[in-house]
Structure formats: structure tokens, C-alpha cells
Image (cartoon, coloured by chain):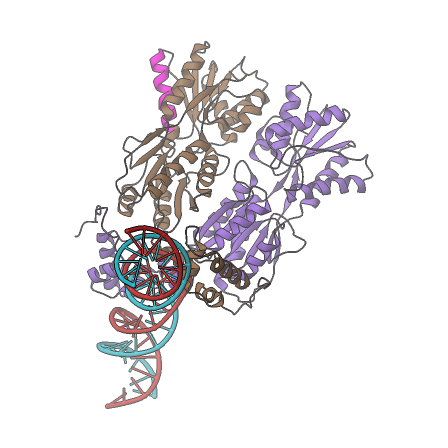
Chain colours: A purple, B brown, C cyan, D red
Amino acid sequence: MAKAASSRPADMQAPTMVDVANRAGVSAMTVSRALKDGGRVSRITREKIMAAVNDLGYVLDQSAGSLSSRKTGFVAAMVPSINNSNFADTARGITDELESTGLQLLLGYTDYTVEKEEKLIEAMLRRRPEGIILTGGAHTERVRRLLKNAGIPVVETWELPSKPIDQVVGFSNEEAMGLLVKTLARKGYRKFGYIGGTTSRDTRGSQRREGFVRAIEELGLPAGRLVSFGVPPISIEQGGQAVVSMLERWPDTEAVLCVSDLSAFGALMECKRRGMKVPQDIAIAGFGDYEVAAFCHPGITTVNVDCYGIGRQAARRLIQIIRGDEKKHEQEIILTGYRVVEREST
Amino acid sequence: MAKAASSRPADMQAPTMVDVANRAGVSAMTVSRALKDGGRVSRITREKIMAAVNDLGYVLDQSAGSLSSRKTGFVAAMVPSINNSNFADTARGITDELESTGLQLLLGYTDYTVEKEEKLIEAMLRRRPEGIILTGGAHTERVRRLLKNAGIPVVETWELPSKPIDQVVGFSNEEAMGLLVKTLARKGYRKFGYIGGTTSRDTRGSQRREGFVRAIEELGLPAGRLVSFGVPPISIEQGGQAVVSMLERWPDTEAVLCVSDLSAFGALMECKRRGMKVPQDIAIAGFGDYEVAAFCHPGITTVNVDCYGIGRQAARRLIQIIRGDEKKHEQEIILTGYRVVEREST
DNA sequence: GCTGGTGATGATATCGATAACATAGCTTAC
DNA sequence: GTAAGCTATGTTATCGATATCATCACCAGC
């Protein structure tokens, strides 16, 4: 039995399908068919071909293939950030869902800005992805035009955009934060504070803040105290700094709600460092249900969001459209769940 | 002035370079040149072309381009995981470094297994990346052969493999953990415990554990107590469970070192939950210098590693080789720094 | 005035695969 | 026994860009 080619001299061209075909004594087309699952090739021929592939160390060239078949097998996805964030779970969900389909993910980090998003999308469209997943509903006009021209399915996630481009997988950040306020109000808290980054960049953060303000109004509570601190995503450290600033201005604040669990954690640790008792002296709640929120002491009350599921469902919807090849696919808005998780911090 | 094409009917083919060329009254080749930076095209012609590009909503097709130029503009990178982990920072470093070069990243998650790594690498080689970045030095034989045949530069990161494939950017996990032990021994701790995942999958974890054991031996301290718990990457929750198990078996343990800050954080919180004083009753240290370690209370002593820098340097080295087109590039081993960061937990 | 250089552009072949159609051989139905 | 159908395979054209070589106009230098 032929041994697999161990190596190739550096100056030698990598083998092509024709090389494999010659070695196996068939045509290139037959090799192509043998290398796809569905290809109808006799068992004997397939074995000869596989032997040749192995001998030559042949690896299929998909760039060539996709030029010809007009299917690149790429899906693009934009997330604001991947470090220490819920979006890592979403990216993971997308990847997992794509895994069995042979589609490959092109992942981009927008750094929470539509300008970076635009640049990334331009770059990725040059790779002719078959579909694209975005975070949020805020995009430049140019991006909307580019995506329209590209003629590929688009899924916006993590929000419910007022003017959706195409598909949506998300939830109302406003309602979710409102629910948190109501849950805490029912426990008797009345003087609420809110901590978030300066808002223009992070639309989800802004929506949560609006949900906070509106819920306070609806409940007829004293006006919410708002602290904006730092550029989103607001870090653990900034959460700590923000709570200090909050307590200086409004020392009688009873409950502090944070735009994310990371800032809530920072606020919590800063309060403990200052010898305050949580929740007796002050209650703290976050958003996102990060692992730290569950296992820190005291545990942080938060809103659980199905980050991973958002990724999976977004990818699944995209695959449906791509594979189904519905020329004229329906717009679908998939709502993902959220729920308040009460822990010791409130 | 012509207005940009707002949209294209769904059944219409996307415009190609030839369409742009016709509209601009030049040849396709000239369009191609105009769209590259270096292309030498007169200012007038370039403006006509750009106008045509804009009118038609033309987007370059890189799959086609790379087939012809034999340069795909892809770089592949494998990380064990991206959720809640140092590798997210490394991935970020790679991305940032690539940004200005026009190279695009194909990112894969190996889930800490060489089998998954092999599958991913096979898939990615079909995209003909111009270079590849790996985490660690443990790979299947097949992967080594595939990479050799591919004839592209390879960078292994985060470790110092005993049998490097090509380039290396990393540090000795063994030494780093040894340094942590020695630092704490100098403070007077004698009875050390170590918490890590079951070792076969996570080679960096294993190396840290070995470094721990060796340092204990060298210092002539009582044999280290080793608790293995869960499948890497070991979570916050598992860190908490592991410290319980440690205290049950060896209640007199003075200092617990953890394979990562996440498990250290879990251990710390569990101890606090049980009313123990840290570091008086027990000292706790981690590895990796995550943000939580710095800002939790008490702060966690740890080993700072330049995660982001590893990514940047790995990418930079790759770019050097790719762009320099050194047919016969030298092997280089780039050491990245680490340092013990002492905080209140020890 | 002729040679040689330079800058801008065009023509053609080609990258490596796959779609689409063609063909040969064999089986099945009535 | 022959038309119809099926399976396995081959042939040819093509996907959309770029490498390479060719061409042409123009200018400088002697």
C-alpha cells in the first residue's frame, strides 16, 4: 500500500485536482464528485481516488471551487466585542450551529461603532458571504445599501430594530430592564440609580437605560439617578468608579442597576471594599447573567439572556434561507427569552 | 453627477469588473489596477472608474482575485476557546495586528482537543491561508504533515513546545507557575495546594501543574496537594467545588494555587461564602491576571501574562514572513514576559 | 532626428475547481 | 427485442479576477 506523501519540496507546486485525477486514472470531474458527499461515484473509483489524494497530500481548494459554483460557504458575523462579553457566547452559538453545515464563519469586531462595522462589512462582502449576522439595528446608510445590493439574507440580533433590514433574532432590552425595575420595586426599593456607559455608541445600553427611566416613571417612583461613566463596554473597574460617583451625589440611593453584570460586579466589589453591606446598605443588580454574577459573593441579581441561543437561532435562520434557497424569503422576527434572576445582592 | 445605485433587482447578476470597465470606457485590467493601492493609473481614469464603481454598486470579488494571484489574504488561527478566557485577548491581538495589512482572520475553536484542531485545520487549509497560528505545541501527526505540505509559516503560541513546527511566540508555563510558588514561599507559606482540571487536554494547565510540583520539590517543602476537578477549562463554579474538596482532604492547607484566575475566583468566593478569611485562614492565587482578579475583593494574587501581546507578536511574525516572502525563513522563538502580581489574597 | 526610457493602458492566458451537457454501457418493462 | 431509464464517467465552457507581455505616446539626451 502506498504511503502518504510525507512532504513536498518547497519549490514544488501543490497538487491540483488534475494531478489527483491523473494518478487515479480518471477525469478531474470524477475526483470532484468523489470529494463531495453527494457525488455518485462507484466504490472502486472512489477508493482509487482517495488513495491518490492521500499519496499526493492533496487538499481541495475551495476558493477555486466557490468561484465556479458561485457558493463560497462563508457566513459573516459582526459582534461589538469578544472579550469578556456576552457576545462571545453568541459567536460560539453561531459557530456551533454552522459546524455541521460546512459553512465557515468570518467574524468581525465592530468595537461598538457603526463606522468600524461599515469598514468590516465592506471587507467581508469582498469574500461574498452567503449570509450575514449583525448585532443591533444601528447601521450606516451605506451599510444598508451594501447589504441590499449584496442580495444575501441578513439577521439582526440582540435587539428589536425599529427598521429591520431583514430577519431579526432578539428581545427588547427596554422591556427586560423595565422588568428588572418592577421586580425590585415590588421588593420595596424606591430610590433607584442606574449606571451605564455614555450612551451614543451602545444602542442596547441606551435601550436598557430608557427602559429603566420609563419603568421608574410608570411606577411613580422618585426620578431615577443616572450615572454615565466611560466608553462602552463599561468595565469592572469603571463600574466601581461609577458607584462611588453615584453615592457621592445621591448617598441615599437604595438600589443600583447596572447596564451589565461586569459593571455591577465592579460596583459590588467597590462597596464591599468600603465596608458597605450588600444588600442592606445598598442593593445592586446587573444585566446579562455572566458567570461571575452567579458565583460571586453575594450573588448578583440580574437579567438572564439567552446569548448562546441568540447565536444558534440567528445561524439557524440564515441556514434555512441559504439552503432553502428561498428567493423571496419572508421576514421573520424571532423573540428570544429573558428572565430576572434574583440573588442575594438585592 | 450620477447617483449611487440604490438597489438591484433580485434576479439580476451582481456587476463584475468587466461591467465597471465598460461603463468607465477602459479595460478590466485598468479597473483592477485602479482598485489596488499600488496600481499606476492616471488620476482622470481612476476617477472615471471610481464613479462607475459607485454607480453600479460594484464590490470586488476576492475569491476570484485570489485564485488568479495565488494569494488569498487569509490567516488562520486556532484557539482553545473564546469564552471567558485569555485567548479572547490573543485573538484580539491577532485581529488588531492584521487590520492594517488587509489580511483576514479565520478563527477556530478547538475546545482544547487535538482532534477538533485537526478537523478545523483541514477545513481551513481548503481556504489556502497564507499562514497559521496555533495555540500550544500538542498536535496530531496528521496536522504536522498537513502543515508541512501546505508550505505556509506556522506560529505556535502560549507555550514553548519541545518540538516546534516553525515559529514560536510564548513563555514557559512551568517556570511561570514555579515563580509564583517561590514568591509565596518567600512570604512564609509552606503547605501548598494546587487546583486544576484533569490534565490530558490542557497542556498549558499540565505544564503549570508540573511547575508547581517541581518548585515545591526544589524548595524542600511538604509535598503539594493536588486536586484535579472537571474538564478544562475549569470554571468559576468548579474552582469553588475544588477548594471544598481540597479543604476536606487537607484542612491545614495554607495556600491554594489555581490553574487560572477563574477557578481562583470561584475558590475565593466559596471560601468567603463559608465565612473564611482570605488570606488569614487560607491564601489563594490564580494565573492569567483576568480583570476579575484585579477588582474583586480581596484582589487575587496572580501571574500576569501578555495575552494580547502574544496575539500581536504572533501575527506580526507571520506578516514578516508572508510579506517578506522569505522562501527559507529562519525559525525564531519569541519569549513573552510574565510577572507575579501580588494582591490581598496572599 | 534617432535611441532609449518611462508611464499608462490593453490583450490574452490562466488560476483550480464545478455546472451543464454528452456519452457509453447496462438494466428493466412490456 | 427494443425503447426508455439509470448509473458512472468524460468533455467543454465558465466563474471573475490578475500576471504577463505587448503596445503606444511622449519626453529627454546627445
Percent position (x, y) of residue A153?
54, 59
A314 versus C13 height, above or below: above
Is residue A62 at all visible to an observer of this figure? Answer: no
Residue A248, located in which quarter of the rendered image? top right
Which residue sits at x=62%, y=29%? A238
Percent position (x, y) of residue A287?
64, 37
Q: Is residue B209 magenta?
A: yes
Residue closest to the eye, B10 or B28: B28
Residue closest to the eye, A100 or A103: A103
A175 versus A256 height, above or below: below
Q: How many marks?
A: 0
Percent position (x, y) of residue B86?
47, 33
Which residue sits at x=48%, y=47%? A107
Residues in magenta, as a range: B206-220
Is residue A78 at all visible to an observer of this figure? Answer: yes
Percent position (x, y) of residue A51?
22, 56
Q: Is residue B146 magenta?
A: no
Instruction: Please state if A294 lies on the left or on the right of A189 as rendered.
Output: left
Instruction: Please state if B123 lies on the left or on the right of A264 as rendered.
Output: left
